Amino acid sequence: MRWRNGEHGYGVVTKVLHWSTVALLLAQLAVGYVMDDKADVPDVDCDPPGEDRSGGDTSDAEEQRLDELEDRCEQAQDVREEDAEDAVGTAWADLWSGDLPGDLAGDPAGGLTLPGWHVLLGLAIVAIGIVRVVWRRTTTLPPWDPRLTRTDRKVLHRAEQTLLAMLFVVPATGIALVVGSSDLVPLHIAAHLCFYAALAVHVGVVVRRRVVGRML
């Protein structure tokens, strides 16, 4: 078992980075297409206990206390409804405020939400993309498989460059959308299309030439 690439083929580090990227992308796509970016907020009855006795059976001080409890409950419900309008944006804000990592340890609301996972997976994809670029700069690639033609090699090289670039472009444009740059929606969609096209080309060549085993 060799850690670096060489005449023998791909090393352990390259293989781990490759399949970790695949796993993160599959998880991110699954979460992204299943989640609802607008969370459902349950209705909360803000009438405090004892409210039904107000209007003669309670003192002025008790009336004021009940009104304050009801006002605080309604304000909290308004905040929850506003946050639910952009669940991904809320998860992003929670991350930077320190609330989102705390959810990983469990919270009374039921743990980390799908938008929260969407944010964390996106950042993880960017992180592994950076690691892959650094590793690529510090280690050589193995020789091309003899089953690949010159055209195959050119196509794979361009496809891999595109896939690596999309590891940054797709999350970056997604983050930009979360923080309010809605003008980047076309770019975000175009980045997805480029990713899928490059992925189809990459998989098509390696399967057709039966070279998938080099990365296993």
Image (cartoon, rainbow, N blue to C red):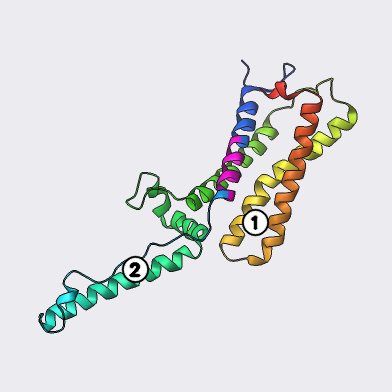
Residue under numbered circle 1: 173
Q: Which amino acid does label 1 sit on?
A: Thr
Residue under numbered circle 2: 76
Q: Which of marks 2 and 1 is in front?
A: 2
Badge count = 2
User: Who is closer to the viewer here, 135 or 23?
Assistant: 23
Count neighbours of disc 1 (C-alpha within 10 A) and say few if under 14, some if 14 to 19, many if 20 or more. Answer: many
Magenta: main secondary structure: helix
The kind of secondary structure element at disc 1 is helix
- What residue is drawn where x is 73% and y is 27%? 140
Give, as a single range, the part of the protein colored magenta: 23-33
Q: Residue 200 in the image: x percent, y percent?
A: 76, 39
Q: In which quarter of the image is the C terminus?
A: top right
- What residue is drawn where x is 60% and y is 45%? 29
Q: Residue furthest right?
A: 150
Q: What residue type is labelled 2?
A: Ala
- What residue is drawn where x is 61% and y is 41%? 25
- What residue is drawn where x is 42% and y is 67%? 81
Q: In this view, does 149 lie to the left or right of 101?
A: right
User: Who is closer to the viewer here, 172 or 112?
Assistant: 112
Residue 12 in which image quadrant: top right
Q: Residue 102 in the image: x percent, y percent?
A: 37, 49
Q: Does the magenta stretch include residue 135?
A: no
Q: Mark 2 or mark 1: which comes first in sequence?
A: 2
> Between marks 2 and 1, how big is the CA–CA gap?
31 Å
Q: Is residue 187 left or right of residue 61?
A: right
Residue 107: which numbered mark, if any? none
Residue 26 in which image quadrant: top right
